[in-house]
Amino acid sequence: MTEKFDPIFIEIMRHELISCSEEMSTTMKQTTRSIVAKEGGDFSAGLLDPEGRVIAQAVPYGLGYFTAVMPHIMKKYRGKFRPGDVIISNDPYGGLSHLPDIALVMPIFWRGDHRGFAAVVQHHTDIGGRFPGGMGLPCAEIYEEGLRLPAVRYYEKGQLIESVREIIAAAVRAPDDVLGDLDAGVAACRRGERALTALFDKYGHDAVFNCYSHLLAHSESLVRSVFRSIPDGSYSCSQTFDDGGGTRVEIAVTLTIKGDDLVVDFTGTGPQVANALNCPPDLIGNFTCNMVFMALLGGSEVPINSGLFAPIQVPVNRVNMPVSIGPGATALTRTPNSAASRAAERVSPSTACLLAA
């Protein structure tokens, strides 16, 4: 297989990769213990390239998580990944959203070389802390919200690190559910590993990697074409959130389209507050990009990968933002999403965001 553009092969490979991620999701669905995962489906699975860019995902939910957490994991472990490792993290200041959301990331090796990652993120039944479920609005600091795992190894060279598992079991109210769901996540990552290495065996490494770059560029191109179809201008929305105890925070967002670029500006939003309405800095941009994508392209046949975010800029002003700079609580971290979704509806009312709530 040469590197020249072959649209038929790339389309075949796109569906092969989507099928791999769907197999991961099916594994999760069939093996999880908790109602949150099995009935609620509050998880996402995907395949990533060696740089941590999302290449394939069955559904767009969770795309913002992977693109936010991977730079932190890469910074800590680049060059140190080994076959059979699994990294676990739920750190809101390390790319995640709130403590009940736990990411599992497994490096994938083929013929001795690191070729990518399989990753799962799931909302768990409990994570310890002051309130059951880890979702207490009155929490003022993250220390009240539960156990914090700052991207540590959960498996090392294929062996479970029992001490990490024991710490988790001792910290949460529903250890059977949490540990059972983590087992399901590891199983899903292993399924993704087998599926991706099977593609390398079938088509060869160079052919698969060549498709990665084409798929990322194609997604970016489709997003840019949508932005070009929208008149240049600014579209704004603001909302006020009330914690029921007297604290009110204003969320203001302006989407500015110029050519095929989009800038999402939260200027005018209130500062960090002493409850769990805050959003960690990494998730401001990535959640917002995910919401804008769902609003403007949610019904389109667009490859779901990191290329979707390339045309979207979200400048984060830590002084005038709902950004928690630590150790603020982040349980209700999605406060910026609703305003961003509603602003996107004003850009394109016919594709009103399904996730605006």
Image (spheres, rainbow, N blue to C red):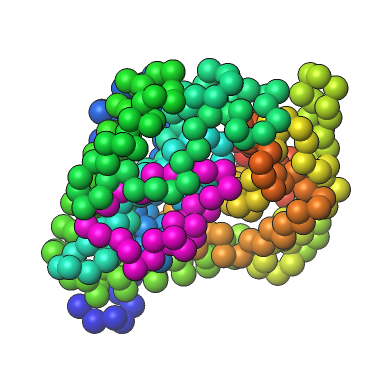
- Image point (53%, 53%), residue name: 68
Residue 148 inside the magenta-drawn segment? no
In the image, residue 284 above or below residue 248: below
- Image point (43%, 23%), residue name: 172
Q: Position of residue 98 (x, y in %)?
A: 56, 36
In the image, residue 34 above or below residue 337: above
Q: Which residues are magenta?
A: 68-94
Instruction: Assign the C terminus to one quadrant of the image.
Output: top right
> In this orientation, which residue lies closer to the viewer: 239 or 278?
278
Instruction: Assign the N terminus to one quadrant of the image.
Output: bottom left
In the image, residue 152 above or below residue 122: below
- Image point (24%, 81%), residue name: 2
For residue 203, which quarter of the picture?
bottom left
- Image point (32%, 33%), residue name: 165
For residue 187, which quarter of the picture?
top left
Q: Position of residue 269 (x, y in %)?
A: 82, 45
For residue 333, which quarter of the picture?
top right
In the image, residue 230 above or below residue 123: below
Residue 91 inside the magenta-drawn segment? yes
| Residue 291 seen from this side | yes
Q: Position of residue 51 (x, y in %)?
A: 40, 66
Give the side of residue 58 with respect to residue 206, left or right. Answer: right
Q: Position of residue 188 (x, y in %)?
A: 27, 41
Q: How many numbered marks have been drawn onto this rendered protein structure?
A: 0
Give the side of residue 250 with respect to residue 175, left or right. Answer: right
| Residue 67 seen from this side | no
> In this orientation, which residue lies closer to the viewer: 256 or 179?
179
Residue that lies at the very extreme toward the front in this rendered image? 163
